Image: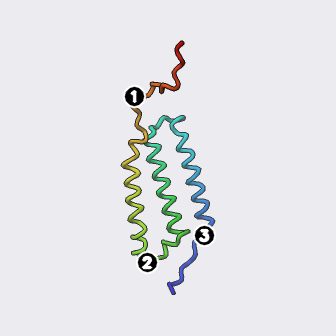
Amino acid sequence: MAAEHKHPNYMAIFYLLAVLTVGEIAVVFLPHYIGISKFAVGVFLCAFAIVKAALVAMYFMHLKFEARTLGLIALTPLTIATLLVFVILPDASFVDHKTANVKPAAEEPAKH
């Protein structure tokens, strides 16, 4: 049997996750009040998501108390997924200014 470890305070982790969620909601509304870019909002949201995923994996999935190799096995796909998100993030805020105001044919008024 594995060595005994002190059980974490799950409610403290839950409250920390709740505070991070409120922080995510606040970050979404920041561009309206202080004028930061959508890209910066995306970076902040990705950072919050990474921290929350790490907390869930460490405490609720008990990876903090497992052997290092199991942690590395779990960390490898997380690292790849994180890199993929940051590579795709610039495309999420891309606006094609040539076609941004062009209405599709179905929305044009009928000509009589």
Per the rendering, the mark at residue 97 is: 1
Contact (Cβ within 8 Å) of mark 1 with mark 2: no
Contact (Cβ within 8 Å) of mark 1 with mark 3: no
Colour style of the rendered protein structure:
rainbow
- Quick check: 105 above or below 21? above
| Viewer-proximal residue among 49 and 91 | 91
Q: Residue furthest top?
A: 112
Per the rendering, the mark at residue 43 is: none
Task: Where is residue 20? Give x, y as percent.
Answer: 55, 54
Question: Element type at marker 2?
Answer: loop
Residue at 39% from the left image edge and 50% from the top image edge:
86
Task: Where is residue 62? Give x, y as percent.
Answer: 52, 72
- Quick check: 66 above or below 39? below
Per the rendering, the mark at residue 67 is: 2
| Sequence order check, earlier mark of 2 and 3 | 3
Mark 2 or mark 3, which is nearer to you?
A: 2
Disc 3 marks which residue? 9
| Sequence order check, earlier mark of 1 and 3 | 3
Left or right of 94 on screen, residue 106: right
Q: Residue furthest front?
A: 112
Rounded to the nearest whole Å, what is the CA distance between mark 1 and mark 2?
52 Å
Rounded to the nearest whole Å, what is the CA distance between mark 2 and mark 3?
21 Å
Question: Element type at marker 3?
Answer: loop
Question: Element type at marker 1?
Answer: loop
Q: Which of the 4 image quadrants contains residue 97?
A: top left
| Viewer-proximal residue among 10 and 112 | 112
Contact (Cβ within 8 Å) of mark 2 with mark 3: no
Q: Residue furthest right?
A: 11
Residue at 61% from the left image edge and 60% from the top image edge:
15
Q: What kind of residue is marked 2?
A: Ala
